Amino acid sequence: MSAESHPGWEAAPDLFDDVAAAIAAAEGAVRPAERYLAAHRAALRVAAGVLARRRPRLRERRSIWVVVAQVAPELGEWAEYFAMLQLKVEAVQAGAVGLVTTREADDLVRDAQAFAVAAHA
């Protein structure tokens, strides 16, 4: 994945670098819980990139996923999916590392990558 292969990120190369680094961190994490959390952070960085490009005017505090769905309706399903994971993410962050299987962590890494591709399309 490179900035050149994703038009729209040229204006925000630092954000693209952040996304690429976050995905690489998720891929490199050894423990499933760490990989899961890193993949979710990567998805959050993608969402931040979407908002940086779309520059919505926010009048009230809302979930990043609600805002992404509003300003980029084509990413609405992704936003819903990642929003649904929030409680599990918080539980794992609080120490419930046994909640995440290797498969779930691997799936979330792939989902974060697919979300990045969809957001950069």
Image (tube, rainbow, N blue to C red):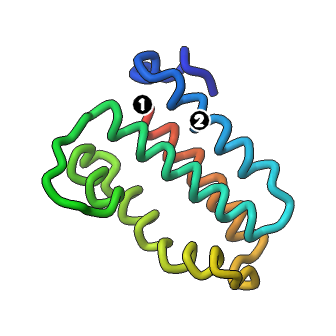
- Type of the residue with mark 1: Ala
- Type of the residue with mark 2: Asp
Question: How far, Cα to Cα, is label 2 from label 1?
Answer: 17 Å
Q: Secondary structure at mark 2?
A: helix
Residue lying at the far right in this picture: please name it: 30
**Residue hosting label 2:** 18
Query: Going 68% across and 70% down the picture, which residue do you hit?
Result: 104
Q: Circle 2: is it few (<14), some (14-19), or many (20+) Cα within 10 Å?
A: some
Query: Going 37% across and 58% down the picture, which residue do you hit?
Result: 79
- Left or right: 120 in relation to 57: right
Count of numbered circles on the image: 2
Q: Quadrant of residue 30?
A: bottom right
Name the foreground residue: 58 vs 31.
Answer: 58
Q: Quadrant of the C terminus?
A: top left
User: Residue 43, position in %: x, y?
Assistant: 52, 51
User: Residue 33, position in %: x, y?
Assistant: 74, 70
User: Residue 5, position in %: x, y?
Assistant: 54, 19
Q: Quadrant of the N terminus?
A: top right
Q: Between tags 2 and 1, which lies in front?
A: 2
Query: Going 29% across and 45% down the picture, which residue do you hit?
Result: 74
Of the numbered discs 2 and 1, the one sitting upstream in the chain is 2
- Left or right: 54 in relation to 50: left
**Residue hosting label 1:** 121
